[in-house]
Amino acid sequence: MDLKLQFLESFKVVGTDRQEHKVCAYDRMARNQALPGGEHWESTGVVEYRLEDGRLVEALADGSLRIHGSNVELRHASNQTA
């Protein structure tokens, strides 16, 4: 199955590493070869999150985000308290 990513949005987060990061959200799109006449792409219903540098971000069941392969948790920058 052919897949591509369609940009949805980006937002700033702060990690438990105390660094500010930019997360980009993408809709995973799959080619629909059943339709004739050119390329037709449809949403798979899966959103993929990546840091601006391309590293994968995991969306956990409790709604939190974590950098894949690390213990760094991410929180929306607007949710931080001083």
Image (spheres, rainbow, N blue to C red):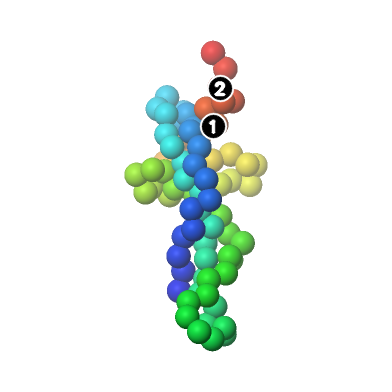
Residue placed at 45% from the left, 65% from the top?
4
Q: Residue furthest left?
A: 53
- Three-letter amino acid code at disc 2? Gln
Decide if residue 69 is in sight here: no
In the picture, the quarter occupied by the C terminus is top right
Residue 80: assigned label: 2
Tags 1 and 2 touching, CB below 8 Å: yes
Residue placed at 47% from the left, 29% from the top?
14
Tag 2's secondary structure?
A: loop
Q: Residue furthest right?
A: 62
Callout 1 environment at 10 Å: few (<14), some (14 to 19), or many (20+)?
A: some
Q: Residue furthest front?
A: 37
Residue 46 percent coordinates (x, y): 58, 59
Quadrant housing residue 53: top left
- According to the picture, the residue beneath numbered tag 1 turns out to be 75
Q: Is residue 2 above or below residue 55?
A: below
Residue placed at 61% from the left, 62% from the top?
45
Tag 1's secondary structure?
A: strand
Residue placed at 52% from the left, 75% from the top?
40
